[in-house]
Image (cartoon, rainbow, N blue to C red):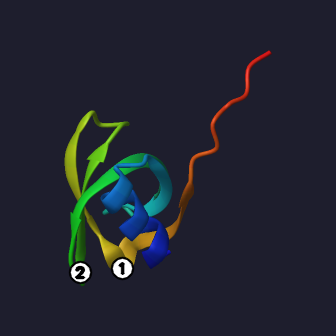
Amino acid sequence: MNGVLKRSMETKQKIVVFYMDGNQQVTQRFIRVLKMDEKRVLAYCYYRKNVRTFKRENILSAGTVNKKVGA
């Protein structure tokens, strides 16, 4: 997971994370990592269309976004 977050920050790549919000609800977010430290990830959230801070302990998983192949 750390590798995916770091790669997003270095390449400005959009990734998907599953995140536990303050109401203990699991949400899927598409983000682009701007900055991160041991406790927090600062990222642009495509769902909220704004820069948001995510607690690293609440990020359940992270992965790359597969591009759609059109016909």
The residue furthest top is 71
Check disc 2 and report its element: helix, strand or loop: loop
Rendered view: 13 above or below 40: above
The residue furthest front is 11
User: What residue does disc 2 label?
Assistant: 39
**Total of numbered circles in the picture?**
2
Rendered view: 57 above or below 9: below
> How crowded is the residue under tag 2: few (<14 C-alpha within 10 Å), some, or many (20+)?
few
Rendered view: 6 above or below 52: below
User: What residue does disc 1 label?
Assistant: 57
Quadrant placement of the C terminus: top right
Which residue is painted at 42% across and 64% down in the image?
A: 7
The answer to whether residue 11 is left or right of residue 42 is right
Rendered view: 61 above or below 44: below
Which residue is painted at 46% across and 74% down in the image?
A: 3
Disc 1 + disc 2, Cβ < 8 Å: yes
Check disc 1 and report its element: helix, strand or loop: helix
Mark toward the start of the polypeptide (1 vs 2): 2
